[in-house]
Amino acid sequence: MTGGQRIHLVDTSLRDGMSSVSHKFTTDQVAAVARGLDAAGVRTIEVAHGIGLGASSIQYGFAAASDPDYVRAAVEAVADADIAVLYVPGIATLTELDRAHEAGAGTVRVAVHCTEADCAEQPIVHARERGMRVMSFLMMSHKLPPAQLAEQAAKLDSYGAQVVYVVDSAGALVPRGAGERVKALREAISADIGFHAHNNLGVGIGNALAAVENGALYIDGSLRGLGASAGNAQTEVLAAALERAGYDTGVDLFPLVDTAERVMAPMMTQPQIIDETALILGYAGVYSTFFHPTKRAAKKYGVPERDILMELGRRGVIGGQEDMIIDVAAQLAGRSEVVGA
């Protein structure tokens, strides 16, 4: 891809970032961040519970407000940006999607495991019939080689997704792997390509740049990198890096940095870093939202977090299998007791 190409930055601070604050952003905080992003020229802003529509529950954690309330707060705060929501089949329902749409969401991002594209057909068709823009996520994209990932992407394309994303849910990819997957999709589908990075191996920005170089037009980020486990590619850094690489994002860097520093930073409970758990999560290829449950299970059962994560990776667990964290921790604790007897 040549320099000067328009790259669309999508900010997910108010959705993926929710996972780092226990889904407790208030509607006022959502409005403040959305207002700053909009003023800086970010034209797609994702909001609501960190796991997506309908996830506020004892299983995934209760949010401070309802999904429609978050959407309305963001919609009322922006002048030009489109507000997006995440839909995970099996967690969200079509009724919840309709409520988010009625509250003002114009885009839905339908997220499925990379081998299960067929699960996305119903919500994609439903959303398109209602005039929504549809982006669709192939989560845990590192688990499929490029050609097989492209086959799944072709299904999403055929259902009507307008943007299909390579999603590095575990932060397990490095730039070559990210670029190869985007290239394979670019050769197989007519929809635009997106890329969503997590930063567990410290290469979130590098992966995003590799994705753009191979044909991705939509790139996700979050202010200050706020997101599950090690967080996401940092929106303000993406804007600067893409500009230096010769791409046009349509974003005004300094207001974006101001929003990151003066609005988002004071709202964060702690800096977004790559600690041991986040690093091993990416190395083992485990879903990013397993970060906090793994820490809790390790403390409860007295076993190392890295041992739990490596075993989860060996078993090939995916999003939705959070119960396996407790099973593995308990089993590891039992083995330790036997060895120590």
Image: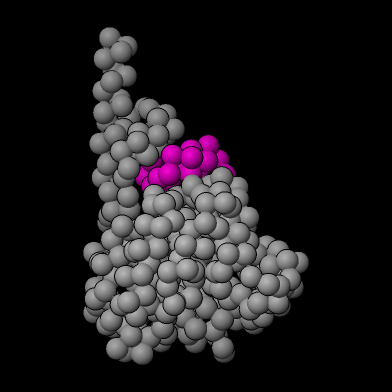
Left or right for 16, reference 322: right
Say above or below: 191 vs 322. Answer: below
Q: Quadrant of the C terminus?
A: top left
Which residue is located at x 58 percent, y 56 percent?
207
Instruction: State the image coordinates of residue 204 (x, y, percent, origin top left).
Output: 58, 54
Q: Looking at this rendering, what residue extends furthest in the top direction?
A: 341
Which residue is located at x 48 percent, y 44 percent?
282
Quadrant position of residue 307: top left
Left or right for 161, reference 123: right
Magenta span has 284?
yes
Magenta span has 326?
no
Q: Across the whole image, how many numbered discs are drawn on residues?
A: 0
Say above or below: 76 vs 281. Answer: below
Q: Most prominent secondary structure in the magenta stretch?
A: helix
Instruction: State the image coordinates of residue 105 (x, y, percent, origin top left).
Output: 41, 83
Using the image as rendered, state which of residue 132 and residue 179 is in the foreground. Answer: 179
- Mark yes or no: residue 11 visible: no
Instruction: State the image coordinates of residue 150 (x, y, percent, origin top left).
Output: 40, 63
